[in-house]
Image (cartoon, rainbow, N blue to C red):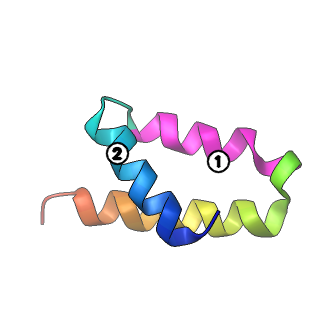
């Protein structure tokens, strides 16, 4: 899954009631099956998503 898709679907999940910790846990749980490079990319995408949703 691309970083763009993670941001889009992560945003949907947050709008539906998921927490920041829920998204981080999903990245953690998919590290071994998805591989470390993809997990790092996903983690960065989630952090960018969360940063963009925080008030200034």
Residue 49 tag number: none
Identified at 26% across, 39% down, the residue is 15
Q: Quadrant of residue 26?
A: top right
Q: Quadrant of residue 43?
A: bottom right
Q: Quadrant of residue 28?
A: top right
**Element marked by disc 2:** helix
What residue span does the magenta drawing correspond to?
20-32
Q: Relative to 24, say whether 53 is above or below.
A: below
Q: Which residue is mark 1?
A: 27
Residue 25 picture location, percent across and down: 60, 37
Q: Which residue is mark 2?
A: 12
- In which quadrant is the C terminus drawn? bottom left
Label 1: few (<14), some (14–19) or many (≥20) C-alpha neighbours in 10 Å:
some
Q: In the shown orientation, is residue 27 left or right of residue 47?
A: right
Name the one closer to the observer, 47 or 11: 11
Secondary structure, magenta segment, majority class: helix
- In which quadrant is the N terminus drawn? bottom right
Q: In the shown orientation, is residue 55 left or right of residue 31?
A: left
Task: Tell me if residue 46 can be seen.
Answer: no
Task: Tell me if residue 1 can be seen.
Answer: yes
Identified at 69% across, 66% down, the residue is 40
Name the one closer to the observer, 5 or 25: 5
Mark 2 and mark 1: Cα distance apart in space: 16 Å
Residue 6 picture location, percent across and down: 51, 59
Label 2 or label 1, whichever lies nearer to me, is 2
Q: Is residue 40 magenta?
A: no
Residue 30 picture location, percent across and down: 75, 44
Residue 18 picture location, percent across and down: 38, 32
**Element marked by disc 1:** helix
Q: Relative to 33, say whether 19 is above or below.
A: above
């Amino acid at each position: 899954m691309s970083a763009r898709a993670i941001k889009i679907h992560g945003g949907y999940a947050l709008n539906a009631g998921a927490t920041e910790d829920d998204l981080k846990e999903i990245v953690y749980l998919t590290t071994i099956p998805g591989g470390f490079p993809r997990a790092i990319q996903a983690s960065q995408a989630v952090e960018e998503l969360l940063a963009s949703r925080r008030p200034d």
